[in-house]
Amino acid sequence: MPDQKCTRSSKRKMKCVKCLSLVNELLKQPDLNEDEISKLNRIKNLLEKGSIISESQVKYIYDLWERHGNQ
């Protein structure tokens, strides 16, 4: 399980890379529903543009990781 600390400093790219890698791993999971896939794709697009995602989006990624990513 990745460390759930999420820093929002000038080095935020490191955090964004971490979240982006989790999103990419989650999108490979076969048991996601359409809504989850849609939300993850929106988050992925934001991260790829270098945007800072909200705390709720970060929490969503980690909640999904808890349910799907450890399989």
Image (spheres, grey):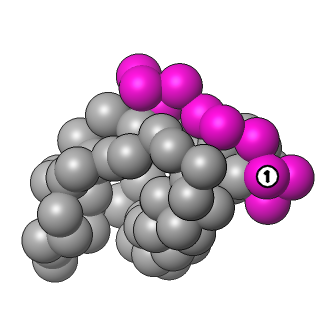
Q: Answer whether residue 57 is visible to the viewer in this image.
A: yes
Check if residue 51 falls in the magenta segment: yes
Residue in front for this viewpoint, 27 or 23: 23
> How would you classify the magenta stretch by its main secondary structure?
loop
> What residue would you read off at disc 1?
50
The image quarter containing residue 53 is top right
User: Which secondary structure, mark 1?
Assistant: loop
Residue 56 lies, with reference to residue 41, above or below; the image says: above
Check if residue 53 falls in the magenta segment: yes
Q: Is residue 61 left or right of residue 54?
A: left
Question: Where does the image place residue 12, in percent across and percent down from the top left?
Answer: 57, 53
Q: Is residue 22 left or right of residue 34?
A: left
Specify start and end residues of the magenta stretch as a single range.
48-57
Q: Answer whether residue 30 is visible to the viewer in this image.
A: no
Q: Is residue 43 left or right of residue 1?
A: right
Q: Looking at the rendering, in which quadrant would you find the N terminus?
A: bottom left
| Count of numbered tags | 1
Image point (42%, 53%), residue name = 32
Q: Label 1 is placed on what type of residue?
A: Gly
Question: Where does the image place residue 56, in percent across and percent down from the top left?
Answer: 41, 22
Question: Where does the image place residue 21, in percent across and percent down from the top left?
Answer: 51, 73
Residue in front for this viewpoint, 70 or 59: 59
